[in-house]
Amino acid sequence: MKRQIPLVLVFIFGMLLAIQYFVPSEPSQRGYEFVLDWITIIGIFAMVLGIWSQVHVGWSKIKHRSENWQYSIVALVSMFAMIAFGLSPFGGLQGTIFRLIYNNVFIPIQATIFSLLAFYIASASYRAFRARSAVSTVLLVAALLLMLRVLPMGPLADPISSIGSWMLLVPNLAAKRAIAIGVGLGGVATALKIVLGIERSYLGKD
């Protein structure tokens, strides 16, 4: 029963939401909004489960003195501190302490992580744009034209800008549409596999 009940519920709600999409009536819309409310509620429980998982994993590392276990202390203390300072007695999410930590700790850390991505992008670009074959040569030329179109090139600005715009609106847009179609078909296939019970990895191990 532990597996049959979730499979039945997934099938029922999957079929109801699929049918609802093609039945634009008021009762159908109310049912859709009701399901969305339940999604929010389930998301809250999922967040609680995620917090418990973080605590369990972190405490296990601290208890067994695993490699870099000190970082688990920092992570747990930071998590509970932000939760505590985000509560109403401390002013909530707009409280002075919460905003101070958020603006002076979280945002600089986030900016640092994103700034590091620039080096990874530069490294990946260097490897991808090396003209080793005809395909990589086309990629290199296209990238150079797209970068040059935003630079002041004097009399060459208009032709390069026109070529760059054509590349974005014709071959690039065609590739984006092909990828979007592929992603859509893949999403539909995955959804059907889940609704029909073919894909059961979300149930965990046997």
Image (cartoon, helix red, strand yellow):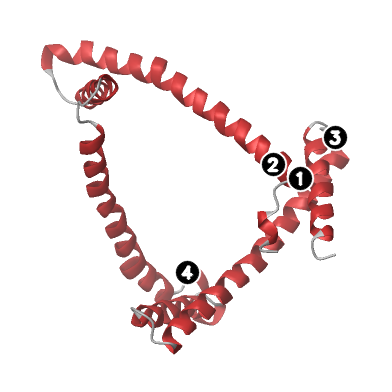
Say which residue label 2 marks.
Answer: 191
Q: Which mark is residue 195?
A: 1
Q: Amino acid at mark 4?
A: Gln
State the separation of the CA atoms marked 4 and 2.
40 Å
Query: Considering only order in the chain, which callout, 1 or 3, is on the residue closer to the N terminus?
Result: 3
Q: What kind of residue is marked 1? A: Val
In front: label 3 or label 4: 3
At 50% from the left edge and 80% from the top edge, which residue is drawn?
Answer: 84
Tag 3 secondary structure: loop
- Location of the N terminus by quadrant is bottom right
Query: Which quadrant would residue 193 be assigned to in this image?
Result: top right
Quadrant hosting residue 99: bottom left
Image quadrant in which the C terminus is located? bottom right
Q: In this view, which residue lies farthest toward the front?
A: 206
- Name the secondary structure under disc 1: helix
Which is more N-terminal, label 4 or label 3? 3
Q: Residue at x 45, y 89 (%)?
A: 63
Label for residue 94?
4
